[in-house]
Amino acid sequence: MSRFTHLDAAGHARMVDVTDKQPTVRAATASGRVACGPDVVAALRSGDVPKGDVLAVARIAGIAAAKRTAELLPLAHVIGVHGAVVDLSVEDDGVHLTATVRTADRTGVEMEALTAVSVAALAVVDMVKGLDKSVSIADVRLEAKTGGKSGDWVRA
């Protein structure tokens, strides 16, 4: 068996077969940020963004994305997303995003949490790009995961 689980003996990409694994409770949390200038931050805080409620749109976009991760990533498994929470907070330098995804399935939800944060950040950019085209997405990363064969992990 290859040391890399997504490669076969010939080095070709493959989807890992998780048929024989038992479902277990798993969770993952990811975070990221959208860097914004002071004018965008002020508009977010006052609710004066012309396109509407940026945080609500981004929250729903992130939840929807978590549920569609396997459609976007060719080697990701279709799993039941049993819980998805996307939180956004406006800070002095932009918007901080956190997503936690939970399942009781055969494989983890790290990619679902990362996808939720990434798409929520894209939604923020889409909603505010008319105010400032220089906004940028940064620091999308896994913060923690629980469950599964590899156990729990938390970013130091």
Image: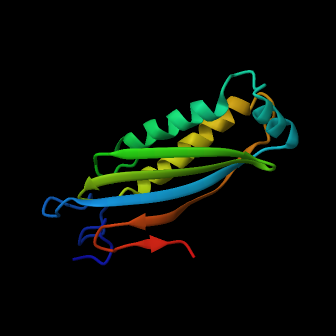
Chosen colour scheme: rainbow
Query: Picture coordinates of residue 81 (x, y %)?
Result: 33, 45
10 to 103, vertically: above or below: below
Query: Picture coordinates of residue 55 (x, y %)?
Result: 63, 35
Q: Residue furthest right?
A: 38
Instruction: Please give left or right for residue 56 compared with residue 138 in the image.
Output: left
For the C terminus, which image quadrant?
bottom right
Residue at the image position 73 percent from the left and 32 percent from the top: 128
Query: Picture coordinates of residue 104 (x, y %)?
Result: 26, 54
- Residue 76 visible in rendering: no
Instruction: Please give left or right for residue 20 compared with residue 1 in the image.
Output: left
Residue toward you, 73 or 38: 38
Query: Picture coordinates of residue 66 (x, y %)?
Result: 42, 44
Question: Dividing the picture into quarters, in which one does residue 21 lie?
Answer: bottom left
Residue at the image position 43 percent from the left and 59 percent from the top: 28
Give the total number of marks visible in the rendering. Answer: 0
104 to 51, vertically: above or below: below
For the N terminus, which image quadrant?
bottom left
- Residue 136 visible in rendering: yes
Q: Residue furthest left?
A: 20
Residue at the image position 51 percent from the left and 40 percent from the top: 62
